[in-house]
Amino acid sequence: MRITIPHLGNVYLAVKILFDSLGLDYVIPPLNSREALSLGSKYSPEEICLPFKLMVGNYIAGVESGADTVLLVGSCGPCRFGEYPELQIRIMKQLGYDVDFIVLDPVQSIGLNELFKRIRKVGLESGKSALSKIGSVFLAYNAMRLIDEIEASAHAIAGYETNPGEAKNLLSSCKKEVFSCSDPVKAVKILNQYRNRIKTIPADYSKKPLKIAVMGEIYTVIEPFSNLYIEDILMDMGVSTVRRLTPTWWLKDMLLKTINLNSRELLKASNEFLPLYIGGHARECIGEAVLAAKEQMDGAIQIFPMGCMPEIVSKSILPSIAQKKKLPVLSLVVDEMTGEAGYLTRIEAFLDLLERRREHVCTRC
Amino acid sequence: MRIGIPKGLLYYRYHAFFETFFSELGSEIIVSEQTNKDILDMGVQFCVDEACLPVKVFHGHAASIKDRCDYLIIPRIMSICKKEYICPKFCGLPEMIIHSIPSVPKVSVDPLYMRNDKELFKWCLSAGSAVTRDSAAIKKAFVSAKKAQKKSRTGIIEPGRRLTVMLAGHPYVVNDDYLNMGIFNKLRAKGIGIITEEFVSDGETREEVKRLVKKPFWTFQRRIFGAACVLIKKNLINGIIYLSSFACGIDSVIIDLIRHFVGDFPMLVIKLDEHTGEAGVDTRVEAFIDMLERRVLNENYNPSPRECVLSGQNPV
Ligand code: SF4
Ligand code: SF4
C-alpha cells in the first residue's frame, strides 16, 4: 500500500512525520500549483467548489507517482465537503485509476467501530507495535501544533520585524528543512528550534502595524495556493495577521464535537448574529469577525470559494457586524479564474482604507 | 396581526401548512405576488451577489411585503427528512434576510424540522405566540394545518402526445412560472408530456440511491437523482430538462450524479440566473425537443407515460 493525501496548508509536513514514523510507504503530491488546478478542473464538475478541484489534482499527481491509496478526512455536514468522496472516487475510477479511498469520517456519522476499521486498514500496514503507533500519532500531532504555532508567530511578527522579510524567510526555510528530513524525531527537533528562532527575530514593538483577521471557508484560508498566498502578501506589506482556523484547531474541533465542547469561544461570539450551526464554518467566520472587533483589530478579510454556500450566508451578515462593531471587512471570492492583479488591487485598496481610517480616528481623539 | 409569507423557496411545498396555520389563528395573511420582474430586481438589489437565483428572488419577495405586515415568516427549514438536509442557505435564511434588507418587521427565526411533529409543533407554538396566547387554539390550528398539507400537491404530471420529459430541479425553480420561463406552457403547446420529481415515491428513490457509495445528504439530491433514475428505468421519459441555478452547489452535484449514472440519456441543463435570457432558453429547448423527436423516430424508442403511478407525497 502506497498512500497519498490531498494538500491542506502544512498538513503534509505532519503527515510525512506520521508516515515516516509508522514506517509506511507514501507519496506526497507536489504542492498545489496552476498545474494541479488545471488538472483538477478538467476532470471535476464545472461548478463544484475550488477545494474539490485542487484535491482531484492532488490525487492524480499522487497516483501518477505510484500511490494506490488515498487517505482523506470526510465530514457529514450539510455542506458539500461530505459529498466530496462520493464524486471523487467516481472521477478517479472513470479516469481509469485503480485506487482505494480510505475516508476518515467523523465518529458521529459512521460510528466508532467503522472509524476504527478504517484506521486499522492503514495501521495494519505498519510493522510497529501498538504502543509505538500511538507514539507516532502523538509525535505527528505535536509536529502539527508546532508548525501552526510557528506560522502564527511569523504572521503576527511580520508587522514588527526590524529587517522586513525575515519572518517570511525563516518560515519558508523551516518548511523546506522539515520536509527534506526523513527522520521524524529529528524533524520535530528542527521544528522546536525554529519555534524559538522565530520568537527571537529582532522586532520593534513600538511600531503600530495594521492588524487583520483572516477568516472564511476553512480550506481556502488554510491552503495558501487557493487564496493566492494572501498571508505572504500581507507579510510583505508589513501587516500582522491572525487566523484562528488551523489544522490543529480543526482536529481539536472534530474531537471535541463528539462531546459538544468544540470552539466555545467562537460559537459564543457568533451567537448574536448567527445562533445556529448551518454547515461549513460559517458560524466560526461570524464569531471570528466579532472577536476581531472586540480585540480592536483594524479589519478582517473573508475568503471563500465561488459558490460556497455557508460563506454566502456569512457574507450577508458581515455588513451588519461591520456596521455595528465598526470593523471593516473585505470579502474575497476565489476560483480558478481569479486574476492576481485584480486581487492584489483589492487588497491594497482595503489596506489603504484601513490606514486612512486609522489616521482619521487618531486625529479625532 | 398581519402575517407576511414570501412566495419563494419551499413556499411551493409548504404553503398549505403555513397559510392554514395562520389563517386558523385568525390572522390576516399577506402572500407576496407571483414572482415578477420587480420582485427579481428587488432581490438582486438586496441580496449578496454570490447567492443563487432562488435565494435572491426570495429576498425580493420578502422585501415586497415587508412594509405591509407585522410578522414575516422566513422559515428556517433545517431538514424535511430524517438525517437529510436541504441547503446551508436555508439554515441561515432568517439571518440573510434580516441583515440584507433594511427595516424588516419581526421575523420568525426558530428552526423548523418538517418531518418531526414535536419539533414542528414547537415551531408553531413559538410562531403562533406572536398571534395568540391561547395554546389550545395553536394546537387546533396545527392539526388542521397538517391536514391541509397532507392534501396539497405540487409538481406536474401531464401525458403528452408522443414525448414525455422530466422537468428536474428544485421545486421552487420548477414550479415558479417566472423562474422556469413559462416552460410548462411551452412544452404543453408542443404536446410534450411533463413529469416532475414529485411523482416518484420516496421509497423508490431511497432504493435507487443505495448504489451510491455514500448516503446522500440532501433531500433533493436523493429525490431528483432517484426520480430521474426510476423514470428512466421504467421507460417513462424520453429526456430530462434540468432547471438549475448558477452557484447552486447542490444542483452541480446532482447533475454530475445523473450524468454519471445514466450515461448518454438525453439531458438538457439550463442554468438560470438573473441574466438568463428567455430567447436563448427557448432555442435550446426547441433544439432539444427536435433531437428527442428524431431519436424516437429513428430508434422506435417510445415510452408510455400512462403507466406512471401517482404516488402521494408532500406529507409534513
Ligand atoms: S463549505 Fe464551501 S467550499 Fe466547503 S464544501 Fe461547502 S460549499 Fe464547498
Ligand atoms: S439548494 Fe441550491 S438553489 Fe436552493 S437555496 Fe441552496 S444553493 Fe440555492
Image: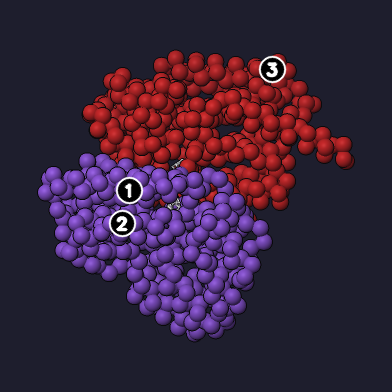
Chain colours: A red, B purple
What residue is shown with label 1? Answer: B285
Structural crowding at the residue carrying mark 1, measured as other residues with C-alpha within 10 Å and reported as few (<14), some (14–19) or many (≥20) = some
Q: Residue furthest left?
A: B300
Q: From the image, which quarter does the C terminus of chain A lie in?
A: top right
Q: From the image, which quarter does the N terminus of chain A lie in?
A: top left
* Number of dots carrying numbers: 3
In percent of the image, x 23 and y 28: which residue is there?
A96
Q: In the rendering, at what x and y percent does residue B17 appear?
A: 43, 73
Structural crowding at the residue carrying mark 2, measured as other residues with C-alpha within 10 Å and reported as few (<14), some (14–19) or many (≥20) = some
- Counting residues from the start of the chain, the first of labels 2 and 1 encountered is 2
Q: In the rendering, at what x and y percent does residue A316 appear?
A: 59, 49
Structural crowding at the residue carrying mark 3, measured as other residues with C-alpha within 10 Å and reported as few (<14), some (14–19) or many (≥20) = some
Give the Cα separation between the discs numbered 2 and 3: 67 Å
**Mark 2 vs mark 3: in front:** 2
Tag of residue A164: 3
Relative to the observer, which residue lies in front, A1 or B33?
Answer: B33
**Mark 1 vs mark 3: in front:** 1
Q: Is residue A25 above or below residue B11?
A: above
**What chain is tagged by disc 1?**
B
Amino acid marked by disc 3: Pro
Label 2 with label 1: CB-CB less than 8 Å: yes
Label 1 with label 3: CB-CB less than 8 Å: no
Q: In the rendering, at what x and y percent does residue B164 appear?
A: 23, 56
Relative to the observer, which residue lies in front, A284 or A45?
Answer: A45
> Is residue B214 at all visible to an observer of this figure?
no
Q: Is residue B160 above or below residue A328?
A: below
Quick one: SS at disc 2?
helix
**What chain is tagged by disc 3?**
A
What residue is shown with label 2? Answer: B187
Label 2 with label 3: CB-CB less than 8 Å: no
Amino acid marked by disc 2: Leu
